[in-house]
Amino acid sequence: MLISRRNQLLLEFSFWNEPLPRKGPNLYELRTYKLKPGTMIEWGNRWARAIKHRQENNEAVGGFFSQIGDLYVVHHLWAYESLQSRDETRNSAWQKEGWDTNVYYTVPLVRSMESRLMIPTKSSPLQ
């Protein structure tokens, strides 16, 4: 029995790479940020400058924001070879000049955050 359902229309941030099929196996992380109302432009401007720190290892799959449904919601999709590579990649971001500044300015914009680790199904183009 269906108890609840939510729909969102998402648009892609222009500064992220287009999500393309990947060879696997990969582990995916979907990070969802619910922002404070009125902060989407500042969030986008900050991430437009900071995404370069996370694209070097090709882990940045896609960045999206809600247009219809729950508003002020951002989704980031990341790909990692394993949990260990996830930890290493995320820790190495802190060594890059400017990453800490991005975190410093974007954390106050967030009302709540959720992270999901996902393993693709065999039919998924994102392996």
Image (spheres, helix red, strand yellow):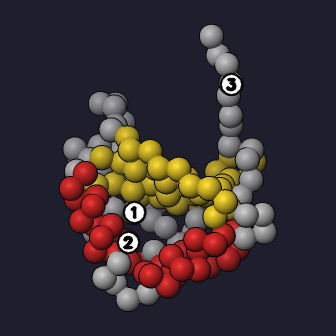
Regarding mark 3 in the picture, which secondary structure is present there?
A: loop
How far is disc 3 from disc 2 in space, using C-alphas?
35 Å
Label 1 vs label 3, nearer the camera: 3
Label 3 vs label 2, nearer the camera: 3
Q: Quadrant of the C terminus?
A: top left
Which residue is labeled 3 in the image?
A: 4
Instruction: Please report contact status of discs 1 and 3: CB closer than 8 Å, yes or no.
Output: no
Regarding mark 1 in the picture, which secondary structure is present there?
A: strand
Instruction: Please report contact status of discs 3 and 2: CB closer than 8 Å, yes or no.
Output: no
Going from the N terminus, do you reach mark 2 or mark 1 first?
A: 2
Q: Exactly how many numbered labels are in the figure?
A: 3
Regarding mark 2 in the picture, which secondary structure is present there?
A: helix
Badge 3, how many Cα within 10 Å: few under 14, some, many 20+?
few
- The three-letter amino acid code for the residue at tag 1 is Ala
Numbered circle sitting on residue 75: none
How far is disc 2 from disc 1 in space, using C-alphas?
6 Å
Percent coordinates x, y for residue 57 in the rendering: 28, 69
Instruction: Please report contact status of discs 2 and 1: CB closer than 8 Å, yes or no.
Output: yes
Residue located 33% across and 67% down the image: 90
Which residue is labeled 2 in the image?
A: 54
Numbered circle sitting on residue 60: 1
Percent coordinates x, y for residue 24 in the rendering: 23, 46
Percent coordinates x, y for residue 44 in the rendering: 62, 73
Residue located 44% across and 82% down the image: 100
Badge 1, how many Cα within 10 Å: few under 14, some, many 20+?
many
- The three-letter amino acid code for the residue at tag 3 is Ser
- Foreground pick, 121 / 20: 121
Residue located 24% across and 65% down the image: 88
Residue located 68% across and 37% down the image: 7
Percent coordinates x, y for residue 46 in the rendering: 58, 79
Residue 61 placement: quadrant: bottom left
